Image: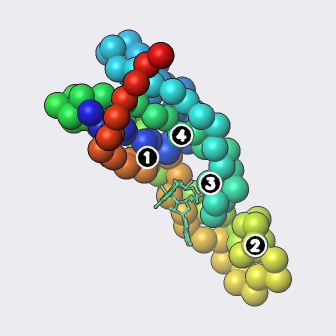
Amino acid sequence: MKLVVIIASDSDAERLLKRLVEQGYPATKIGSTGGFLRRGNATILSGVEADEVDAVLAAVRAECRARTEHVPVHALPFFGEGATIAEPIEVRVGGAIVFVLPVERFEKT
Ligand code: 2BA
C-alpha cells in the first residue's frame, strides 16, 4: 500500500477530491498553508494499492494545472519586509506537489 500526499491549490483540490471519490479512491482533504506565499492550499491524503498510484497521479494531472502569477515582493511575508526589489516575482500557482510514501501498516478499527 502507498500513501499519496498531494498539495494543491484550494480550487483545484476541491475538483480533485470529487474526481478521486467518483473513481473509487479514498481521499481526505486537510486545509494547509504554503510556507512561501502563505496562501491557503489543501493537502489531500489518499491511501491506495501500489498499482493504483498511477491512476491517482493521472487524476492529479487532469485537475491540477500549473500556471504562473506575478506577486509583488512586498506582499510576501518574511521576504517582503524591507524588500529592495521593486519588480514583482514570478511564482508557480496551481499545479500540485505529490509525495508517494510506502505504508508500513494500515488498520481500520
Ligand atoms: P508555497 O510554499 O506557498 O509556495 C508557492 C509557490 O511559490 C511554489 O509553488 C513555488 O513556485 C514558489 N516558491 C516557493 N518557495 C520559493 C522560494 N524560496 N523562492 C521563489 N519561489 C518560491 P510549488 O512549488 O508548486 O509549491 C506549492 C506549495 O506546495 C507550496 O506553497 C508548499 O505549500 C508546498 N510544497 C512545495 N514543495 C514542498 C516540499 N518539498 N515539501 C513540502 N511542501 C512543499
Q: Nearer the viewer, residue 82 or 67?
A: 82
Q: Residue at x 64, y 37 (%)?
A: 31
Q: Residues within 10 Å of mark 1 (few under 14, many from 20)?
A: many
Q: Residues within 10 Å of mark 2 (few under 14, many from 20)?
A: few
Image location (x, y in percent) of residue 47: 36, 30
Give the residue pinned by disc 2.
Answer: 78
- Looking at marks 1 and 2 on the same chain, the residue that comes earlier in the sequence is marked by 2
User: Do the numbered discs 4 and 3 sit on residues whose CB atoms are within 8 Å?
Assistant: no
Q: CA distance from mark 4 to mark 3?
A: 10 Å
Image location (x, y in percent) of residue 102: 30, 44
- Looking at marks 4 and 2 on the same chain, the residue that comes earlier in the sequence is marked by 4
Kind of residue at disc 3 = Gly
Q: Residue at x 63, y 44 (%)?
A: 32
- Split into 4 quadrants, where in the image is the N terminus? top left
SS category of the residue bearing label 2: loop
Give the residue pinned by disc 4.
Answer: 43
Depicted 2 relative to depicted 98: above or below:
above
Q: Quadrant of residue 2?
A: top left
- Ligand 1 is within 8 Å of the C-beta of the residue at disc 3: yes
Q: Nearer the viewer, residue 60 or 43?
A: 43
Give the residue pinned by disc 1.
Answer: 96
Kind of residue at disc 1 = Ala
Kind of residue at disc 2 = Phe
Q: Residues within 10 Å of mark 4 (few under 14, many from 20)?
A: many
User: Do the numbered discs 3 and 2 sit on residues whose CB atoms are within 8 Å?
Assistant: no
The answer to whether residue 96 of the structure is visible from this angle is: yes
- Ligand 1 is within 8 Å of the C-beta of the residue at disc 1: yes
The answer to whether residue 62 of the structure is visible from this angle is: no
